[in-house]
Image (cartoon, helix red, strand yellow):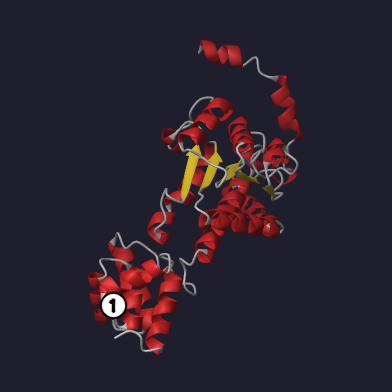
């Protein structure tokens, strides 16, 4: 309580900063929100949300630059990191967490850092977003190098934790990307690539978990999906690298094998079992008519890039170099 009373005196510099942010402006369309019936409240929120995709669309060239930069880094032994606080940090955590079951990609390639640590995913950590030293410590603990890419996520573009992370990343030679909803905000000064959709004032003034967060979620999903496609972890539009760790994913894996190879459900089930749950290996086995060990060798020969392994199997079969 004493700390709160001392801090409530405030920081006029921060006050002035917030006044200038588009995400902190009052939205005239929702000025009388508290006086409206439920359906009208929802219509206003929905109408504002419709604008988000168009704002993101204008940033597609910059998103593409970020994707290509991260793909290049990964191919050269680097990693990519998301760094954020609050909602922005949680969105980064979610995106990375979903890579493992969907594309069999874990912390060897991507990590998310949230201000305040893992506990901040579930509850706010007081003052964490202002702790610049913590941001640097987190990156140092992960032994970031000049081969890596750091993606800073900040709706306002003024979060000290994110700015410090990008500044340190730049100092050691790593590539940096900023995702913010305020063009020209402080975070952009430390970014090689800036992705800044103009989502405008929120329905609830300053509540950037709304439109700004929706834009960030769209961008992160687009980026990580495109990265996985570029890395060969998608064939056509099939997630051939998924990890079948649940009943749903096991059945999805079988369907992918069936679609890609034309085999029956029973054959797909047998192949998946023989391949020890490795969907790509099962597809290679079916396409090339080889056993699991040979399929693994084909994968190893192509740097464990699923699409390349499948293509090699098809080529060898056509050339009759496989029995």
Count the marks: how many? 1
Query: Residue 12 location, x and y as percent?
Result: 72, 20
Task: Please tell me which residue lies in front, 202 or 35.
Answer: 202
Q: Quadrant of the C terminus?
A: bottom left
Give the residue displayed 43% in from the left and 69% down from the top: 302
Query: Residue 98 location, x and y as percent?
Result: 43, 54
At label 1, counting other C-alpha atoms closer than 10 Å, the crowd grade (few under 14, some 14-19, many 20 or more) is many
Query: Residue 108 location, x and y as percent?
Result: 42, 49
Indicate whether 238 appears above or below 75: below
Query: Residue 233 location, x and y as percent?
Result: 45, 66
Determine whether, in the image, residue 46 is placed left or right of residue 189: left
Indicate whether 65 appears above or below 168: below
The reply to whether residue 220 is in sight is yes
Task: Please tell me which residue lies in front, 257 or 50.
Answer: 257
Determine whether, in the image, residue 111 is placed left or right of residue 262: right
Q: Quadrant of residue 204?
A: top right
Dot 1 falls on a residue whose secondary structure is: helix
Q: Which residue is mark 1?
A: 268
Determine whether, in the image, residue 91 is placed left or right of residue 243: right
Determine whether, in the image, residue 49 is placed left or right of residue 112: right
Indicate whether 172 appears above or below 281: above
Give the residue displayed 30% in from the left and 59% down from the top: 245
The reply to whether residue 254 is in sight is no
Task: Please tell me which residue lies in front, 309 or 2.
Answer: 309
């Amino acid at each position: 309580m004493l700390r709160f009373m001392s801090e409530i005196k405030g920081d006029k510099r921060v006050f002035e900063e917030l006044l200038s942010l588009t995400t902190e402006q009052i939205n005239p369309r929702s000025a009388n929100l508290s006086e409206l019936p439920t359906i009208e409240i929802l219509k206003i929120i929905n109408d504002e949300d419709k604008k988000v995709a168009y704002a993101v669309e204008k940033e597609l060239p910059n998103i593409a630059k970020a994707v290509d930069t991260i793909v290049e880094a990964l191919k050269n032994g680097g990693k990519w990191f998301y760094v954020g606080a609050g909602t922005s940090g949680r969105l980064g955590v979610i995106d990375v967490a979903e890579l493992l079951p969907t594309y069999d990609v874990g912390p060897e390639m991507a990590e998310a850092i949230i201000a305040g640590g893992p506990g901040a995913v579930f509850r706010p950590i007081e003052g964490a977003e202002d702790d610049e030293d913590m941001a640097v410590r987190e990156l140092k603990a992960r032994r970031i190098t000049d081969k890596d890419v750091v993606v800073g996520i900040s709706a306002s573009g003024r979060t000290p934790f994110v700015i410090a992370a990008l500044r340190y990343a730049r100092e050691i030679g790593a590539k940096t990307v900023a995702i913010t909803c305020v063009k020209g905000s402080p975070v952009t000064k430390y970014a090689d690539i800036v992705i800044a959709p103009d989502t405008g004032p929120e329905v609830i003034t300053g509540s950037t978990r709304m439109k700004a967060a929706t834009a960030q979620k769209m961008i992160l999903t687009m980026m990580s999906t495109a990265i996985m496609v570029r890395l060969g972890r998608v064939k056509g539009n099939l997630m051939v690298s998924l990890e079948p760790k649940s009943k749903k994913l096991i059945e999805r894996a079988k369907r992918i094998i069936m679609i890609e190879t034309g085999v029956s459900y029973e054959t797909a089930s047998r192949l998946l079992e023989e391949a020890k749950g490795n969907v790509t290996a099962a597809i290679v086995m079916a396409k090339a008519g080889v056993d699991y060990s040979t399929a693994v060798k084909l994968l190893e020969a192509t740097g464990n890039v699923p699409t390349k392994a499948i293509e090699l199997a098809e080529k060898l079969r056509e050339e009759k170099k496989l029995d």
